Structures are given as C-alpha cells and as structure tokens.
Image (spheres, rainbow, N blue to C red):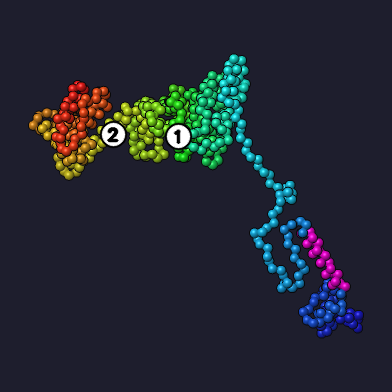
C-alpha cells in the first residue's frame, strides 16, 4: 500500500477515499494543490480541526489584510464613505438611521483644481464717456484746431453697441427706467450729438454707420430689454438716414423695430409722444420720404431690386403707425393729421391696393389701405368713388340677369334708383322711396318730380338735394342747431345771433324764436 493510500483526505468519506487517488492521478493532478472543498457535515468540522490548519489560517489572514487596506484607502479618499464593523451575523446589522437629506457638504476648497468649475465674472457696465458739456467743448476745440481725434473716439465708442449707447445717453446708467412715462434718456444730449454729427468729417460719419451696422447684426437671443428699446429709440433719430445711401441700414433698423412684440411697441409709442414737435415731425418726414423714394426711386440702381426688399415699405409703414398712435395720444396733437399724408400714393394704382385689402384684410399681404392715415383725402375720394361705381354696375348687372332669367322684358329704369317725389311732401316722399327701394340704394340716383316733365341729367338730383336739406333744417324739425354747426364747418365763419332754444313739448313750441334766430343766421350767411 502506498503512502497516499495510508493517509486519507480529511474532507472525504472513507468509501470515497480509495478511489480518489486514482482519479487525481489520471485526470486532475493539479487539484491537489488547491484547498479542500469543505462539506456541510460534522466530519467537515473535525477535518478542519485536524488537518491543514496552517494553510487556512494563512489564507484568512491574507483576505482580512486586503480588506483592511481597502477600507483604509476608501476612508482616506472619500469622506462620505460609511465604515461598518466586522459583522458575522445578519441580525447584528445596525439600523439604517442616516437620512438621505442629511448629506455632508463638500467644501469647494477641498476639491482638486480639475474639479473646480470656473466662476463667470459679472458683466461690466460701460462707463459714461463724456457729459454734454465736455462733448460740446471737444467739438469747439476740434473746429478751431482741426484735430477731430477726440470727437472721433467718442463717436467710435458710443455707437459701438447698444450698452454703449445706453451708457452715453441714459440719465443714470445703473437705473432700469422700466416705465412708459420716462424713457430715462437725456434728450438734450441726444439732440446735441446728432446736430454736431452732420458737421463732422466724413470718416466720423462713416464710423457711426459702421457701429450701427455692427449693433444691428449682433445675435438676438431672447426678448429685448428696455435698454435695447432705448437704443432703437436713439438710433431712429439719426439724421444720417435722410441720405439715400444709408437706406439699406435704415431699412434693417425699421425692420427690427417693426418685428418687436406689442408690449415693446407700447413703450416706444409713449416715448415718442415725449419728443419735441420739431424732432417728431422730422421722424415722420424721414419715413414718408423713405416710402416715396422706394416707390419711385430717382436712381433705381441705388437700391436693391424690389423683389429682394419687399419688406422695406411694410416695415416703414408699421413704424409710421407707431408715430401716428403717439400723435393721437397727445392733446393737442404734436403735428396735424394731414402731415401723415403721403401725396406720392396718389400716383399708384389705388384700386389694386383697395382690392388687395378687401381680399386679404390685415393678413400677410401688405396694402396701404391697412394704414389709412397715410392716404390723402383726394386718394380716399377716388377709392370711394370708383368703388361706388363698381358696386352700381354690379348691382345693375345682377338685376338685368335676374330679369332675363325670369323671361321678362328688361327695362332701362331698373339700372337706376328711381325716386318720384312731390314738392309739397318732399321729405316724407323721399323717406318712403328710400325705405321701399333699399335693394337699389347702390344704384345711380335718378329723381323725378311728380307732375313735371323732365329728364334727370344731374340737374334734378342737385335740386332735390338742395330742397331736401332746406326742408330738413326747417325750424319745425328742430335741427337748426345742426344747421348752424354745419354752416360753421363749411367755412361761413358766421355764428347765429340771438338765442337758440331746443325743441320741447311739440313741433311748434317756441317756433317763433327759432324762426327769428334762423332768419338772422341765414341773412348773415348770404
């Protein structure tokens, strides 16, 4: 018997011990070097006590040493790591009492330089370059010495960006001025800078235009602030935009103002009404000139093709509407409403504009009829007259078609609004005719007096109007007050002498006094 047979394995049963050495020799000789597999029986405990105690204790100490080093490394690297004691039984686990919300705060000083996020510095507000007094002194020195460098540097800095404009012209650069009543801009300083700009050398004026271009081309992120609105308000007053060579820049400025939201337009409108009458009128005239020269350019090669800049005129009209709204908010208005008329529009196809407005309304299709305050009285008269004629023709044609469709003989009188009245009952007959023939009100008027032979070629209609007005303003109807005011508006310049009493109690109450007053007024007018 070999030595292996005499020493059985401490972990194997006696029946298996005889066959185990042969299997180990033939198949897995290397498994002898591995620690024995421990069984769950009582023999396993006895085997652990008897054999290989040195090997197992050495392996256990190795594992415990590794665990201790790992725990020590984790304790030094992570201050928030929790170290639990060596627990052999699950029942001995400590209760979880650490609240998730009670986390230890890590000071930013303990972090490495790679983990620290760089803190962005606060934006530095531009400093006001000069006061109005300093600027005017520099301009006078430049005119006397011919050295414009100081003035040039001022314009270069001021028009470089919107923040620089606010720093130069705001009454207080640190205040927000979020109110419609006060724009926060030193208007006198703005006027002084622009008045002096036109008398400066060309290089300074070009510098200002370059700065405006750079400001308008800056990327727009988010809604506009009140400082941006102030910058638009200041740039819009630039007198350089009177020159056609600057119209491309002017158009982009108008476009950005026109596309602002309604709340921003509300601020601009109230700021516009604070302008002086002279500056306000200059803005209106500049916009009207811009529209006229875009419609009928003196030199077409100066401007881009109309197909590529179709937004020029709509943008200018929208800004002009803001000025018109501001003008109507002031009592009395800054300028007469007739100053908004653009006489150039009298020479365009107004009916096409009118039909476009009727078809599309206030949609994306632009029409001057959307802004009626720019259309003169003469142009409006033409539009109303031609529209009335077209409606007359349309209604007459429809009546003729209906007559033919019913196989009736057409009559030429069906093309007119025929009114037959008696001279003795002029008012009552006229009202009865208008009430019965409402469907023909848009047809051409044709008047016939009952019992009188005559063809109305226009004279009978004029006579009917004259007699009807005289009858309506008769004292018995109590409309003499309206007649007096109508006479004043027609330019007679005469006020009726004597008391004017209202009609009370009946149609003839106080008629004598009213007749005398009406007679004196009529004599003065004639």
Earlier in the chain: of badge 2 and badge 1, it is: 1
Mark yes or no: residue 7 visible. yes
Q: Which residues are magenta?
A: 54-74
Q: Residue at x 71, y 51 (%)?
A: 107
Residue 328 located within the stretch drawn in magenta: no
User: Residue shown at 27%/27% (left/top)?
Assistant: 489
Instruction: State whether residue 368 appears in this view.
Output: no
On screen, residue 90 above or below 253: below
Q: How many marks?
A: 2
Q: Is residue 57 magenta?
A: yes
- Residues 406 and 53: in front is 53
The residue carrying pointer 2 sits among few (fewer than 14), some (14 to 19) or many (20 or more) residues within 10 Å by Cα, namely some
Residue 352 position, x and y percent, is 34, 33
Looking at the rendered image, the quarter that the C terminus falls into is top left
**What element does badge 1 sit on?**
helix
Apparent side of residue 405 relative to residue 49 in the rendered image (left or right): left
Cα distance in 3D space between marks 2 and 1: 37 Å
From the viewer's perspective, is 112 left or right of 46?
left
Question: Pointer 1: what residue?
Answer: 270
Q: Quadrant of the N terminus?
A: bottom right
Residue 17's place in the image compared with 147, above or below, is below
In this rendering, which labeled residue sits more in front, label 2 or label 1?
Answer: 1
Which is more toward the observer, 144 or 63? 144
At a point 52% along the width and 29% down the height, the residue shown is: 186
Above or below 502: residue 75: below
Image quadrant of residue 480? top left
Question: Which residue lies under the disc numbered 2?
Answer: 387
């Amino acid at each position: 018997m070999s030595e292996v047979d005499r020493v059985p394995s401490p972990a194997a049963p006696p029946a298996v011990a005889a066959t185990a050495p042969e299997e180990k020799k033939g198949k897995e000789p290397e498994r002898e070097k591995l620690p024995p597999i421990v069984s769950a029986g009582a023999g396993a405990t006895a085997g652990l006590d008897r054999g290989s105690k040195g090997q197992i204790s050495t392996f256990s100490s190795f594992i415990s040493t590794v665990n201790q080093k790992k725990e020590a490394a984790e304790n030094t690297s992570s201050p928030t790591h929790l170290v639990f004691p060596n627990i052999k039984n699950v029942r001995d686990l400590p209760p979880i009492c650490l609240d998730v919300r009670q986390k230890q705060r890590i000071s930013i000083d303990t972090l490495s330089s790679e983990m620290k996020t760089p803190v962005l510095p606060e934006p530095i507000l531009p400093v006001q370059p000069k006061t109005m007094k300093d600027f005017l002194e520099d301009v006078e020195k430049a005119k006397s010495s011919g050295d414009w460098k100081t003035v040039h540097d001022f314009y270069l800095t001021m028009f470089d960006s919107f923040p620089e404009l606010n720093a130069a012209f705001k009454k207080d650069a640190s205040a927000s001025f979020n109110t419609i009543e006060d724009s926060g801009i030193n208007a006198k300083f703005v006027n002084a800078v622009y008045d002096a700009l036109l008398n400066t050398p060309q290089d300074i004026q070009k510098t200002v235009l370059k700065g405006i271009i750079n400001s308008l081309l800056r990327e727009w992120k988010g809604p506009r602030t009140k400082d941006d609105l102030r910058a638009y308000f200041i740039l819009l007053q630039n007198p350089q935009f009177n020159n056609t060579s600057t119209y491309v820049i002017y158009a982009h400025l108008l476009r950005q103002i026109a596309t602002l939201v309604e709340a921003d337009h509300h601020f601009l409108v109230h700021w516009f009404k604070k302008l002086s009458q002279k500056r306000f009128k200059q803005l209106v005239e500049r916009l009207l000139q811009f529209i006229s020269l875009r419609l009928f350019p003196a030199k077409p090669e100066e401007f881009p093709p109309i197909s590529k800049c179709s937004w020029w005129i709509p943008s200018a009209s929208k800004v002009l509407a803001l000025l018109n709204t501001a003008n109507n908010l002031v009592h009395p208005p800054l300028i007469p409403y007739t100053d908004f008329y653009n006489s150039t529009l009298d020479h365009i196809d107004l009916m096409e504009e009118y039909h476009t407005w009727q078809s599309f309304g206030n949609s994306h299709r632009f029409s001057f009829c959307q802004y009626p305050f720019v259309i003169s009285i003469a142009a409006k008269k033409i539009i109303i007259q031609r529209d009335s004629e077209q409606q007359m023709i349309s209604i007459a044609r429809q009546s003729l078609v209906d007559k033919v469709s019913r196989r009736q003989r057409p009559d030429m009188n069906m093309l007119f609004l025929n009114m037959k009245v008696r001279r003795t009952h002029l008012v009552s007959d006229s009202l009865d005719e208008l009430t019965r023939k409402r469907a023909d009100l848009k047809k051409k008027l044709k008047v016939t007096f009952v019992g009188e032979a005559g063809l109305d070629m226009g004279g009978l209609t004029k006579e009917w109007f004259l007699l009807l007005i005289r009858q309506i303003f008769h004292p018995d109807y109590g409309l003499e007050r309206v007649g007096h005011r109508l006479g004043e508006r027609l330019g007679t310049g005469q006020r009726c002498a004597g008391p004017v009493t209202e009609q009370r109690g009946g149609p003839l109450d106080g008629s004598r006094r009213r007749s005398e007053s009406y007679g004196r007024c009529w004599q003065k007018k004639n």
